[in-house]
Amino acid sequence: MTLKAVRGLLEAIAERIIHFGPAGTGTAYKLIVNMLGAVQIASAAEAMAIAERAGLDRALVAEPSRRARRQALKSYEIAAAWLPTTTIETSCSLRSCD
């Protein structure tokens, strides 16, 4: 099914529609977003474990991170600006990593 065929439905339920290209490119984007979220969750859990081992109050440690969300969004903007001019060598594809 093409974007053109479902645009009316999407406009009724979505704030914004982003078209990345042919079939599969949106899935690649979703995998990237999922990876970013998973990394953030894992790093937050590790940080909280360190805070707990240090004897810090978890609620007090978590409070500034609620305010830091704006800074996290800024980090994405910086990364997006940096990546187009930078080549990153990896042995990964969407199918596997060696």
Image (tube, rainbow, N blue to C red):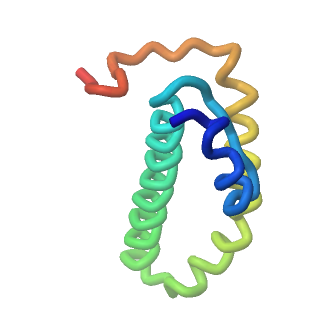
Tell me where residue 22 appears, x and y as whole percent: 54, 24
Q: Is residue 54 above or below residue 96?
A: below
Q: Quadrant of residue 20?
A: top right
Tell me where residue 39 appears, x and y as whole percent: 45, 51
Q: Is residue 96 above or below residue 38?
A: above
Q: Is residue 68 above or below residue 9?
A: below
Residue at 33% across, 17% down: 91
Give the number of marks: 0
Q: Is residue 1 above or below residue 48?
A: above
Residue 27 or residue 67, whichever sits in front: 27
Residue at 41% across, 67% down: 45
Tell me where residue 59 appears, x and y as whole percent: 55, 87
Q: Quadrant of residue 94?
A: top left
Q: Quarter of the image containing the C terminus? A: top left
Tell me where residue 82 appears, x and y as whole percent: 71, 25
Residue located farthest toward the left when viewing the structure as drawn? 98
Left or right relative to 70: residue 10: left
Residue at 62% across, 37% down: 3
Residue 5 or residue 32, whichever sits in front: 5
Q: Quadrant of residue 53?
A: bottom left
